[in-house]
Image: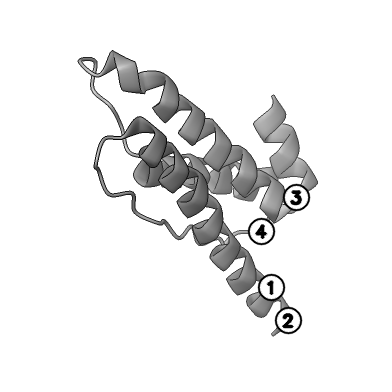
Amino acid sequence: MNIFNKQNLLTLALVTTFAVPAISTAAAMNTGRNVNPVTVSFADLNLTEDKGVETLYGRLKVGAKQSCGTVSARQLNLFRSNKECLETALTDAVESINNEKLSELHSS
C-alpha cells in the first residue's frame, strides 16, 4: 500500500514538474498556446530492471513533448525555447523520481 501511495505522489510531482517549466517557457515564447499538464504513470513498471527504467524514460520523453508542445520548421524563433522546455521538463522529472538507474540513463 505504501508503494502505491508513493507512486501516486510521484505522479503528482511529475504533473507539476511538467506544468511549471512548460508554462513559464510558453509565457516566454509569447505564443498564446495553451500548455497541457501531463501525467506519466509508472505504477506498472519495475524500476529495478533496465527494461522498466527504459520504458519509463520513454514515457517521460513523450510526456515532455505533450506538455511543451512542438514547433514547426517555420518557427525557428521558437525552437530554442521549446528545446529548453523539453530538456528542463525531462531533467526535472528524472530528478523528482530519484532513481539511480533512471538518472544514469538520462545522463548518458
Q: Earlier in the sequence, mark 4 or mark 1?
A: 1
Residue carrying label 3: 99
Whole-percent x, y for residue 58 in the image: 50, 41
Residue carrying label 1: 6
Q: Secondary structure at mark 3?
A: loop
Q: Earlier in the sequence, mark 3 or mark 2?
A: 2
Q: Earlier in the sequence, mark 1 or mark 3?
A: 1
Q: Looking at numbered disc 1 in the image, what kind of residue is underneath it?
A: Lys
Tell me the distance, in whole angstroms, between the alpha carbons under discs 1 and 3.
13 Å
Looking at the image, the residue that sits furthest to the left is 74
Residue shown at 62%/50% (left/top)?
Answer: 52
Asked if the residues shown at circle 2 and circle 1 are in contact, with their CB atoms under 8 angstroms apart, the answer is: yes
Tell me the distance, in whole angstroms, between the alpha carbons under discs 2 and 1.
6 Å
Q: Looking at numbered disc 4 in the image, what kind of residue is underneath it?
A: Asn
Tell me the quadrant of the picture where the N terminus can be found. Answer: bottom right
Pair 4/2: label in front: 2
Residue 2's disc is 2
Residue carrying label 4: 46
Tell me the distance, in whole angstroms, between the alpha carbons under discs 4 and 1.
14 Å
Asked if the residues shown at circle 1 and circle 3 are in contact, with their CB atoms under 8 angstroms apart, the answer is: no
Q: Looking at numbered disc 3 in the image, what kind of residue is underneath it?
A: Asn
Residue shown at 32%/16% (left/top)?
Answer: 77
Q: Is residue 41 visible?
A: yes
Asked if the residues shown at circle 4 and circle 1 are in contact, with their CB atoms under 8 angstroms apart, the answer is: no
Whole-percent x, y for residue 27 in the image: 38, 40
Pair 4/1: label in front: 1
Q: Is residue 46 above or below residue 1?
A: above
Tell me the distance, in whole angstroms, between the alpha carbons under discs 4 and 2.
15 Å
Q: Looking at numbered disc 2 in the image, what kind of residue is underneath it?
A: Asn
Q: Left of 55 or right of it: where is 92?
A: right
Q: Is residue 69 above or below residue 39?
A: above
